[in-house]
Protein backbone atom coordinates (compact mmCIF):
# COMPACT_ATOMS: atom_id res chain seq x y z
CA UNK A 1 0.00 0.00 0.00
CA UNK A 2 1.45 3.39 -0.94
CA UNK A 3 1.31 6.11 1.69
CA UNK A 4 0.12 9.60 0.76
CA UNK A 5 2.99 12.03 -0.04
CA UNK A 6 4.45 14.16 2.76
CA UNK A 7 3.95 17.93 2.70
CA UNK A 8 7.16 19.45 1.31
CA UNK A 9 7.67 21.98 4.13
CA UNK A 10 7.89 19.11 6.63
CA UNK A 11 10.87 17.68 4.84
CA UNK A 12 12.80 20.90 5.44
CA UNK A 13 12.00 21.12 9.19
CA UNK A 14 14.74 20.75 11.78
CA UNK A 15 15.23 17.24 13.16
CA UNK A 16 16.49 16.96 16.75
CA UNK A 17 19.58 14.85 17.46
CA UNK A 18 19.06 11.37 18.90
CA UNK A 19 21.04 10.79 22.12
CA UNK A 20 22.31 7.27 22.92
CA UNK A 21 19.48 4.96 23.94
CA UNK A 22 19.82 2.51 26.83
CA UNK A 23 17.46 1.01 29.41
CA UNK A 24 17.86 4.16 31.54
CA UNK A 25 15.88 6.07 28.92
CA UNK A 26 12.77 4.00 29.62
CA UNK A 27 13.37 4.64 33.34
CA UNK A 28 13.44 8.37 32.66
CA UNK A 29 10.09 8.19 30.87
CA UNK A 30 8.70 6.24 33.84
CA UNK A 31 10.07 8.71 36.35
CA UNK A 32 9.07 11.93 34.62
CA UNK A 33 5.94 11.16 32.62
CA UNK A 34 4.08 7.85 32.88
CA UNK A 35 5.12 6.11 36.06
CA UNK A 36 6.42 2.58 36.11
CA UNK A 37 4.02 -0.12 34.94
CA UNK A 38 4.43 -2.80 37.64
CA UNK A 39 5.29 -6.38 36.89
CA UNK A 40 2.56 -8.83 37.72
CA UNK A 41 -1.04 -9.56 37.07
CA UNK A 42 -1.58 -13.21 36.23
CA UNK A 43 -4.32 -14.50 33.95
CA UNK A 44 -6.10 -17.12 36.07
CA UNK A 45 -9.32 -17.67 34.13
CA UNK A 46 -10.32 -17.32 30.50
CA UNK A 47 -13.84 -18.38 29.59
CA UNK A 48 -15.34 -18.22 26.09
CA UNK A 49 -18.75 -16.62 26.59
CA UNK A 50 -19.97 -16.54 23.00
CA UNK A 51 -18.94 -17.15 19.42
CA UNK A 52 -20.65 -15.70 16.35
CA UNK A 53 -19.32 -17.05 13.09
CA UNK A 54 -19.36 -15.16 9.80
CA UNK A 55 -19.79 -11.60 11.11
CA UNK A 56 -18.60 -8.55 9.11
CA UNK A 57 -20.05 -10.00 5.89
CA UNK A 58 -18.40 -13.32 6.53
CA UNK A 59 -14.92 -11.85 7.00
CA UNK A 60 -14.62 -12.79 10.69
CA UNK A 61 -15.79 -14.78 13.67
CA UNK A 62 -16.49 -12.81 16.84
CA UNK A 63 -15.48 -14.36 20.17
CA UNK A 64 -16.33 -12.87 23.55
CA UNK A 65 -14.23 -13.95 26.51
CA UNK A 66 -14.37 -13.26 30.21
CA UNK A 67 -10.92 -13.04 31.77
CA UNK A 68 -9.84 -12.89 35.39
CA UNK A 69 -6.44 -11.42 36.17
CA UNK A 70 -5.07 -11.92 39.67
CA UNK A 71 -3.29 -8.81 40.94
CA UNK A 72 -1.52 -8.42 44.30
CA UNK A 73 -4.55 -6.83 46.01
CA UNK A 74 -7.44 -8.46 44.14
CA UNK A 75 -8.77 -9.63 40.79
CA UNK A 76 -9.42 -7.56 37.69
CA UNK A 77 -12.16 -8.89 35.40
CA UNK A 78 -12.19 -8.09 31.70
CA UNK A 79 -14.72 -8.77 28.95
CA UNK A 80 -12.77 -8.95 25.70
CA UNK A 81 -13.89 -9.11 22.07
CA UNK A 82 -11.80 -10.95 19.52
CA UNK A 83 -12.38 -10.85 15.77
CA UNK A 84 -10.75 -13.83 14.08
CA UNK A 85 -10.35 -13.62 10.30
CA UNK A 86 -12.36 -16.23 8.42
CA UNK A 87 -10.36 -19.43 8.10
CA UNK A 88 -8.23 -18.94 11.23
CA UNK A 89 -8.10 -22.13 13.29
CA UNK A 90 -5.90 -24.09 15.66
CA UNK A 91 -4.25 -25.62 12.59
CA UNK A 92 -3.97 -22.26 10.80
CA UNK A 93 -3.44 -19.66 13.51
CA UNK A 94 -3.04 -15.99 12.61
CA UNK A 95 -1.01 -13.21 14.26
CA UNK A 96 -2.80 -10.81 16.57
CA UNK A 97 -3.31 -7.09 17.04
CA UNK A 98 -4.10 -6.17 20.64
CA UNK A 99 -5.88 -2.85 21.05
CA UNK A 100 -7.89 -0.81 23.48
CA UNK A 101 -11.29 0.45 22.43
CA UNK A 102 -13.01 3.66 23.45
CA UNK A 103 -16.32 1.79 23.43
CA UNK A 104 -17.15 -1.90 23.83
CA UNK A 105 -18.94 -2.13 20.49
CA UNK A 106 -16.10 -0.91 18.22
CA UNK A 107 -15.39 -3.43 15.49
CA UNK A 108 -12.71 -3.62 12.82
CA UNK A 109 -13.93 -3.46 9.21
CA UNK A 110 -14.21 -6.50 6.93
CA UNK A 111 -11.33 -5.10 4.87
CA UNK A 112 -9.13 -4.89 7.97
CA UNK A 113 -9.96 -8.51 8.80
CA UNK A 114 -8.87 -9.50 5.31
CA UNK A 115 -5.36 -8.30 6.21
CA UNK A 116 -5.16 -11.59 8.11
CA UNK A 117 -4.76 -10.49 11.73
CA UNK A 118 -6.93 -11.38 14.70
CA UNK A 119 -7.99 -8.23 16.57
CA UNK A 120 -8.31 -8.63 20.33
CA UNK A 121 -9.69 -5.61 22.16
CA UNK A 122 -11.24 -4.42 25.38
CA UNK A 123 -12.97 -1.22 26.43
CA UNK A 124 -10.05 0.68 27.98
CA UNK A 125 -12.02 1.86 30.99
CA UNK A 126 -12.41 -1.73 32.17
CA UNK A 127 -8.71 -1.48 33.02
CA UNK A 128 -8.65 1.97 34.53
CA UNK A 129 -11.43 4.59 34.49
CA UNK A 130 -10.56 7.71 32.52
CA UNK A 131 -11.43 10.05 35.33
CA UNK A 132 -9.27 12.11 37.70
CA UNK A 133 -11.56 11.10 40.58
CA UNK A 134 -13.14 7.80 39.50
CA UNK A 135 -16.24 6.59 41.35
CA UNK A 136 -14.77 3.08 41.32
CA UNK A 137 -11.03 2.48 41.12
CA UNK A 138 -9.37 0.44 38.39
CA UNK A 139 -6.27 -1.72 38.29
CA UNK A 140 -4.10 0.88 39.97
CA UNK A 141 -5.89 0.14 43.23
CA UNK A 142 -5.02 -3.54 42.86
CA UNK A 143 -1.28 -2.96 43.22
CA UNK A 144 0.45 -1.69 46.35
CA UNK A 145 1.74 1.88 46.13
CA UNK A 146 5.03 1.57 44.36
CA UNK A 147 8.32 3.30 44.08
CA UNK A 148 9.27 4.49 40.63
CA UNK A 149 12.64 2.84 40.22
CA UNK A 150 15.45 4.51 38.42
CA UNK A 151 18.91 3.38 37.46
CA UNK A 152 21.84 4.21 39.72
CA UNK A 153 23.09 6.72 37.20
CA UNK A 154 19.97 8.85 37.63
CA UNK A 155 20.31 11.39 40.40
CA UNK A 156 16.71 11.68 41.53
CA UNK A 157 15.93 8.05 42.10
CA UNK A 158 13.64 8.01 45.13
CA UNK A 159 10.22 8.98 43.95
CA UNK A 160 7.08 7.35 45.27
CA UNK A 161 4.72 8.65 42.64
CA UNK A 162 1.77 6.54 41.56
CA UNK A 163 1.67 5.29 37.99
CA UNK A 164 -0.62 7.24 35.71
CA UNK A 165 -3.67 5.96 33.84
CA UNK A 166 -1.71 5.77 30.57
CA UNK A 167 0.65 3.31 32.26
CA UNK A 168 -2.34 1.36 33.59
CA UNK A 169 -3.75 1.08 30.07
CA UNK A 170 -0.31 -0.03 28.87
CA UNK A 171 -0.37 -2.75 31.55
CA UNK A 172 -3.78 -3.79 30.17
CA UNK A 173 -2.35 -4.16 26.68
CA UNK A 174 0.21 -6.61 28.02
CA UNK A 175 -2.57 -8.58 29.70
CA UNK A 176 -4.46 -8.71 26.39
CA UNK A 177 -1.40 -10.39 24.96
CA UNK A 178 -1.52 -12.97 27.78
CA UNK A 179 -5.17 -13.55 26.86
CA UNK A 180 -4.31 -13.91 23.15
CA UNK A 181 -2.10 -16.84 24.09
CA UNK A 182 -5.18 -18.74 25.27
CA UNK A 183 -7.37 -18.22 22.20
CA UNK A 184 -7.58 -20.95 19.61
CA UNK A 185 -6.80 -19.64 16.14
CA UNK A 186 -4.47 -16.92 17.45
CA UNK A 187 -0.71 -17.20 17.06
CA UNK A 188 0.73 -15.01 19.85
CA UNK A 189 4.14 -14.77 18.14
CA UNK A 190 5.02 -11.41 16.52
CA UNK A 191 2.10 -9.49 18.04
CA UNK A 192 1.12 -5.95 17.17
CA UNK A 193 -0.01 -3.42 19.78
CA UNK A 194 -2.13 -0.61 18.40
CA UNK A 195 -3.87 2.45 19.79
CA UNK A 196 -5.39 5.74 18.77
CA UNK A 197 -5.01 9.07 20.52
CA UNK A 198 -4.74 8.64 24.32
CA UNK A 199 -4.70 4.92 23.61
CA UNK A 200 -1.88 5.49 21.12
CA UNK A 201 0.11 6.97 24.00
CA UNK A 202 -0.66 3.78 25.97
CA UNK A 203 0.35 1.59 23.01
CA UNK A 204 3.74 3.33 22.82
CA UNK A 205 4.33 2.96 26.54
CA UNK A 206 3.34 -0.73 26.32
CA UNK A 207 5.64 -1.23 23.33
CA UNK A 208 8.54 0.42 25.14
CA UNK A 209 8.16 -1.74 28.23
CA UNK A 210 6.93 -5.13 27.00
CA UNK A 211 9.46 -6.68 24.68
CA UNK A 212 7.02 -9.30 23.48
CA UNK A 213 5.41 -6.71 21.20
CA UNK A 214 7.00 -7.06 17.76
CA UNK A 215 5.27 -4.01 16.27
CA UNK A 216 3.92 -0.91 18.05
CA UNK A 217 1.39 1.28 16.22
CA UNK A 218 0.58 4.78 17.50
CA UNK A 219 -2.19 6.55 15.57
CA UNK A 220 -2.89 10.24 16.25
CA UNK A 221 -1.07 9.83 19.56
CA UNK A 222 0.04 13.47 19.82
CA UNK A 223 1.35 15.02 23.03
CA UNK A 224 2.95 12.35 25.28
CA UNK A 225 2.58 9.98 22.34
CA UNK A 226 4.71 10.27 19.21
CA UNK A 227 4.89 14.03 18.92
CA UNK A 228 7.94 15.99 20.10
CA UNK A 229 7.50 18.17 23.20
CA UNK A 230 10.06 20.58 21.80
CA UNK A 231 8.25 21.08 18.52
CA UNK A 232 5.83 23.97 18.99
CA UNK A 233 2.21 23.41 18.01
CA UNK A 234 -0.75 21.46 19.28
CA UNK A 235 -1.28 20.29 22.83
CA UNK A 236 1.43 21.04 25.38
CA UNK A 237 2.22 19.87 28.90
CA UNK A 238 0.20 22.66 30.53
CA UNK A 239 -2.92 21.75 28.53
CA UNK A 240 -2.65 17.99 28.93
CA UNK A 241 -1.86 18.00 32.65
CA UNK A 242 -4.64 20.48 33.39
CA UNK A 243 -7.30 18.47 31.61
CA UNK A 244 -5.96 14.97 32.27
CA UNK A 245 -3.90 15.09 35.51
CA UNK A 246 -4.65 11.41 36.15
CA UNK A 247 -2.87 10.20 32.99
CA UNK A 248 0.65 10.83 34.32
CA UNK A 249 2.78 10.98 37.44
CA UNK A 250 1.73 14.07 39.43
CA UNK A 251 5.12 15.79 39.09
CA UNK A 252 4.89 15.78 35.28
CA UNK A 253 2.89 19.02 35.53
CA UNK A 254 5.98 20.80 36.89
CA UNK A 255 7.30 20.80 33.30
CA UNK A 256 4.29 22.85 32.10
CA UNK A 257 5.57 25.82 30.14
CA UNK A 258 9.08 24.48 30.58
CA UNK A 259 9.23 21.72 27.97
CA UNK A 260 12.94 22.30 27.37
CA UNK A 261 13.80 21.15 30.90
CA UNK A 262 12.21 17.72 30.41
CA UNK A 263 15.12 15.24 30.38
CA UNK A 264 13.62 13.28 27.45
CA UNK A 265 11.67 13.81 24.26
CA UNK A 266 9.41 11.48 22.35
CA UNK A 267 11.82 10.48 19.56
CA UNK A 268 13.77 8.76 22.35
CA UNK A 269 10.67 6.80 23.35
CA UNK A 270 10.23 5.63 19.75
CA UNK A 271 13.93 4.74 19.55
CA UNK A 272 13.79 2.82 22.83
CA UNK A 273 11.49 0.31 21.14
CA UNK A 274 14.14 -0.62 18.54
CA UNK A 275 15.16 -3.18 17.37
CA UNK A 276 11.48 -4.06 17.56
CA UNK A 277 9.39 -2.11 15.05
CA UNK A 278 7.26 1.02 15.30
CA UNK A 279 4.62 2.62 13.10
CA UNK A 280 3.34 6.17 13.58
CA UNK A 281 0.32 7.62 11.80
CA UNK A 282 -0.90 11.22 11.63
CA UNK A 283 -3.73 13.15 10.01
CA UNK A 284 -3.07 16.46 8.27
CA UNK A 285 -5.83 18.40 10.02
CA UNK A 286 -5.16 16.94 13.46
CA UNK A 287 -3.41 20.10 14.65
CA UNK A 288 -3.95 19.29 18.35
CA UNK A 289 -1.81 16.14 17.94
CA UNK A 290 0.85 18.15 16.03
CA UNK A 291 1.36 15.91 12.97
CA UNK A 292 4.63 17.70 12.07
CA UNK A 293 5.96 16.98 15.57
CA UNK A 294 5.01 13.31 15.12
CA UNK A 295 6.74 13.14 11.75
CA UNK A 296 9.91 14.79 13.07
CA UNK A 297 10.05 12.34 15.99
CA UNK A 298 9.97 9.47 13.50
CA UNK A 299 12.73 10.97 11.37
CA UNK A 300 14.82 11.69 14.48
CA UNK A 301 14.35 8.12 15.80
CA UNK A 302 15.14 6.47 12.47
CA UNK A 303 18.89 5.92 13.11
CA UNK A 304 17.97 3.51 15.94
CA UNK A 305 16.10 1.20 13.58
CA UNK A 306 17.10 -1.16 10.81
CA UNK A 307 15.55 -1.03 7.34
CA UNK A 308 11.75 -1.21 7.63
CA UNK A 309 12.12 -0.76 11.39
CA UNK A 310 10.04 2.40 11.63
CA UNK A 311 7.21 3.50 9.35
CA UNK A 312 4.99 6.53 9.04
CA UNK A 313 2.06 7.93 7.13
CA UNK A 314 0.08 11.13 7.17
CA UNK A 315 -3.30 11.15 5.50
CA UNK A 316 -5.75 13.93 4.74
CA UNK A 317 -8.45 14.50 7.33
CA UNK A 318 -8.94 14.82 11.05
CA UNK A 319 -8.27 13.06 14.34
CA UNK A 320 -9.54 9.50 13.91
CA UNK A 321 -8.51 5.89 13.44
CA UNK A 322 -9.79 5.05 9.98
CA UNK A 323 -9.80 1.88 7.94
CA UNK A 324 -6.98 3.31 5.83
CA UNK A 325 -4.87 3.86 8.98
CA UNK A 326 -5.36 0.21 9.95
CA UNK A 327 -4.50 -0.98 6.44
CA UNK A 328 -1.30 1.08 6.21
CA UNK A 329 -0.21 -0.07 9.67
CA UNK A 330 -0.92 -3.75 9.01
CA UNK A 331 0.81 -3.60 5.61
CA UNK A 332 3.86 -2.27 7.49
CA UNK A 333 3.56 -4.94 10.20
CA UNK A 334 3.50 -7.69 7.59
CA UNK A 335 6.67 -6.53 5.88
C1 LIG B 1 -7.67 14.97 23.71
C2 LIG B 1 -6.32 15.02 24.35
C3 LIG B 1 -5.32 14.34 23.49
C4 LIG B 1 -5.82 13.02 22.91
C5 LIG B 1 -7.33 12.98 22.71
C6 LIG B 1 -7.98 11.61 22.63
O1 LIG B 1 -8.64 15.68 24.36
O2 LIG B 1 -5.99 16.35 24.56
O3 LIG B 1 -4.10 14.20 24.18
O4 LIG B 1 -5.36 11.95 23.62
O5 LIG B 1 -8.01 13.63 23.67
O6 LIG B 1 -7.62 10.66 23.29
O7 LIG B 1 -8.97 11.54 21.88
Image (cartoon, helix red, strand yellow):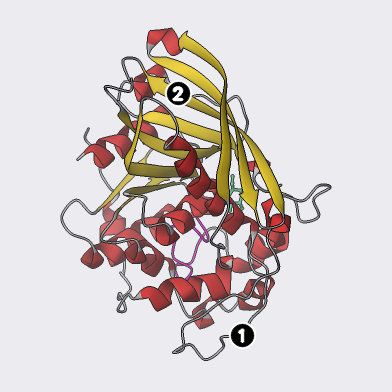
> Is 226 within the magenta?
yes
Residue visible at 37% across and 66% down in the picture: 267
Residue 283 visible? no
Residue visible at 45% across and 34% down in the picture: 182
> Which secondary structure lies at badge 1?
loop
Above or below 330: residue 28: below
Residue under numbered circle 2: 83
Q: Quadrant of residue 11?
A: bottom left
Label 2 neighbourhood size at 10 Å, few (<14), some (14-19), many (20+)?
many
Q: Give the image location of residue 228, x and y in percent.
A: 44, 65
Residue 266 visible? yes
Q: Earlier in the sequence, mark 1 or mark 2?
A: 2
- The quadrant of the picture occupied by the C terminus is top left
Residue visible at 58% across and 52% down in the picture: 41
Q: Quadrant of residue 72?
A: bottom right
For the magenta stretch, what is the residue range? 221-233
Q: Give the image location of residue 245, x and y in percent.
A: 70, 62
> Is 52 within the magenta?
no
Q: Which mark is residue 158?
A: 1
Amino acid sequence: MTSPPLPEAWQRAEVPPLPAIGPEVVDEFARTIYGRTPEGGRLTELVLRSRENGVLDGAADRLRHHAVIACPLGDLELDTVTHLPAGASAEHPVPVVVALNFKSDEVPSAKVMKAGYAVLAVDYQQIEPDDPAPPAPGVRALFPTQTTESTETTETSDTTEPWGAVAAWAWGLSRLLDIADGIEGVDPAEPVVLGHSRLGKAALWAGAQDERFAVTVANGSGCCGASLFRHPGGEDIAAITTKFPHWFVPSFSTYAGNESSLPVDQHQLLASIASRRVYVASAEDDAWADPVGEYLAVVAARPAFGPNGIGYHVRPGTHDLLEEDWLHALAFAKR
